[in-house]
Amino acid sequence: MKIGGFQKNTLIDFPGTIACIVFTKGCNFICPYCHNPDLVATPKKVATDLFDENKIFNFLEKRKGLLEGVVISGGEPTLQEDLIAFSRIIKDMGYRLKLDTNGTRPEILAKLFEQELVDFVSMDIKTCLEKYHLVVPGKFDAKKIYESIRLLMNKAPAYEFRTTCVRPFINKKIMTDIGKMIMGASTYNLQKCSRNVTVLDPKFLKADHNFFSDKQMLELKAIIDKYVTTSVVR
């Protein structure tokens, strides 16, 4: 796996689980508000500054009984050719596994579910299907996002959907469209975008209009509450 970062401990990224985080390098999205710009690597940079996965396995071996789970995040983990093999090693070591994904490769998610390699999946929903061209360079079949949504709702042992709420990717109409797309989902998290971090496009942070107030976030929550069991503003 092309691993661009490793966090040894987290209490908040895997619900109910003391975990570490493996950050894979490389992403097929270009979200301007991305908080991990170093992981959205160009082909020339993707092979540099990588973590040795064997050192991570050694760390996990020593932390058995202390750590309970591993989060694989990114970047976009499903782009990694050896994600399934990597996940199997983690599961064979006795750890629970959480995957963070943008949902662009439902075929990989299906394999992970079939082989019972994941315990929890967090899927980012960027916008409504009609607007995905705003975050995906080149041609992309947005129906793959819907396929991944249905897979999570039907096959995942546990899951959550989440959206970073910023304009022009989110507005009240788009939130309604997302609600209809995930109708009946168990959990949906609305994330307020931080302006105190390094992002992929620094100019994006300077436009006040891109960001929602606390009151506006609650208005978006009221919309999604009509479609899901539980929603949370973070």
Image (spheres, rainbow, N blue to C red):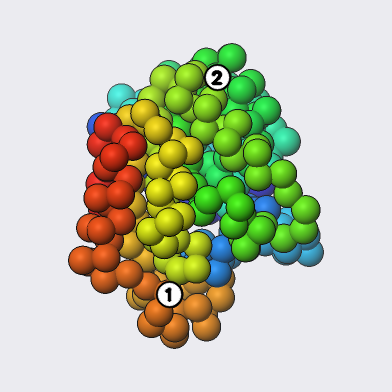
What is the spatial separation of the Cα atoms under label 1 and label 2, in whole angstroms?
36 Å
Q: Check the image and report above or below for 223 versus 32.
A: above
> 86 or 27: which is nearer to us?
27
Q: Residue at x 53, y 51 (%)?
A: 128
Looking at the rendered structure, the secondary structure element under dot 1 is helix
Above or below 199: residue 6: above
Tell me the amino acid under the disc marked 1: Asn
Residue 174 point in image, percent of width and height:
46, 55
Q: Which residue is mark 2?
A: 113
Binning the other alpha carbons within 10 Å of mark 2 as few (below 14), some (14 to 19) or many (20 upward) gives some
In primary-sequence order, the first of circles 1 and 2 is 2
Which residue sits at x=23%, y=58%?
218
Task: Read off the residue under disc 1.
Answer: 210
Disc number placed over residue 150 in the picture, else none:
none
Residue 179 visible somewhere in the drawing: yes
Residue 92, given in percent of the width and then of the height, sits at 51, 17
* Image-based side of 18 in relation to 144, left or right: left
Which of labels 1 and 2 is toward the front?
Answer: 1
Please tell me which residue is depicted at 31% across the width and 25% down the height of the picture: 65
Residue sitting at x 77%, y 58%: 138
Q: Amino acid at mark 2?
A: Phe
Residue 14 in sight here: no
Q: Quadrant of residue 31?
A: bottom right
* SS assignment at label 2: helix
